[in-house]
Image (tube, rainbow, N blue to C red):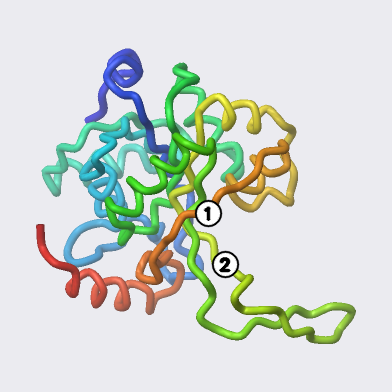
Amino acid sequence: MASNLQSLNSNHLNYVIIVAGGSGSRMQSNLPKQFLLLNGKPVLMHTIEAFEQSAFKPGIILVLPEAYHTYWQQLIEEYSFTIPHQLVSGGETRFHSVKQGLDLITDTDALVAVQDAVRPLVSPAIIDDAYRCAAEHGTAVVAVKSRDSIRQVRDGKSVSLIRDEIYLVQTPQTFKASLLKKAYEQPFNSTFTDDASVVEQYGAEIKLTEGDHSNIKITFPEDIAIAELLLNKKPQL
């Protein structure tokens, strides 16, 4: 299934850590959402395929709860899935899971993307733009401008915010490995909602790159239907 650690580190200049720690609770399913079928194939396989198609050809590290390693192996065989990847057990939180993946990367000159397993519609073009931005600036966080008016609740009262200044954050979030590793040496904090918040707390400036509103996160049951509609509209390679 997976390349071993030695070949993973020697054959790649770039990496992606795909974090698949979600449960199926909000999907009203006993099966974690990364394993649900999207156009007849598990969501997670679509996500891995997007990075395999990237011009940057990253080494793929999949962080998955240990309880599901055997099930993932069964899916690989069932769907004849052949894309090489390194499998590692997840941690207590997303923060700890990313740290587990980072431990496999010894090349501090590498670029490392971190991707939600349940964003299966991310395009190779978005991935490539993020790697290029990270190579130049050290950080690259995919985001889109809000299409809706935004209000914030302060002291029980709602306050209007300027929509053009509001960005909705997606993944991948891509960084120079040296920076990401140092940022993840910080103690865990509950305010760490994503990799950008960890790196920003460390003191680095976050650069945004353009995402796509179709790069949705599979969270609720209706998201599968929306993703299938969007996927079927994409031009076939």
- Residue 208 — which label? 1
Work out whether residue 106 or residue 45 is closer to the camera in this orientation and state it: 106
Picture residue at 56% right of the left edge, 49% below the top: 207
Q: Badge 2 is on which residue?
A: 167
Q: What element carries label 1?
A: strand
Picture residue at 43% right of the left edge, 60% below the top: 210
Q: State which quarter of the image contains the C terminus.
A: bottom left
Q: In this view, does 120 lie above or below 110?
A: below
Q: Where is residue 4 in the image (x, y as percent from the top left)?
A: 29, 19
Q: Is mark 2 on a helix, strand or loop?
A: strand
In the image, what residue type sits under mark 2? Answer: Tyr
Q: Where is residue 186 in the image (x, y as percent from the top left)?
A: 72, 31
Q: State which quarter of the image contains the N terminus.
A: top left
Q: In which quarter of the image is residue 83?
A: top left
* Sequence order check, earlier mark of 2 and 1: 2
Q: Do the residues labelled 2 and 1 touch (CB within 8 Å)?
A: yes
Work out whether residue 120 or residue 152 is closer to the camera in this orientation and state it: 152
In the image, what residue type sits under mark 1? Answer: Leu
Work out whether residue 41 or residue 177 is closer to the camera in this orientation and state it: 177
Q: Where is residue 236 in the image (x, y as percent from the top left)?
A: 10, 63
Taking the image as shown, residue 49 lies to the left or right of residue 106, namely: left
Q: In this view, does 213 lie above or below 202?
A: below
Q: Quadrant of residue 59?
A: top left
The 10 Å Cα crowd at callout 1, few under 14, some 14 to 19, many 20 or more, is some
Taking the image as shown, residue 180 lies to the left or right of residue 172, namely: right
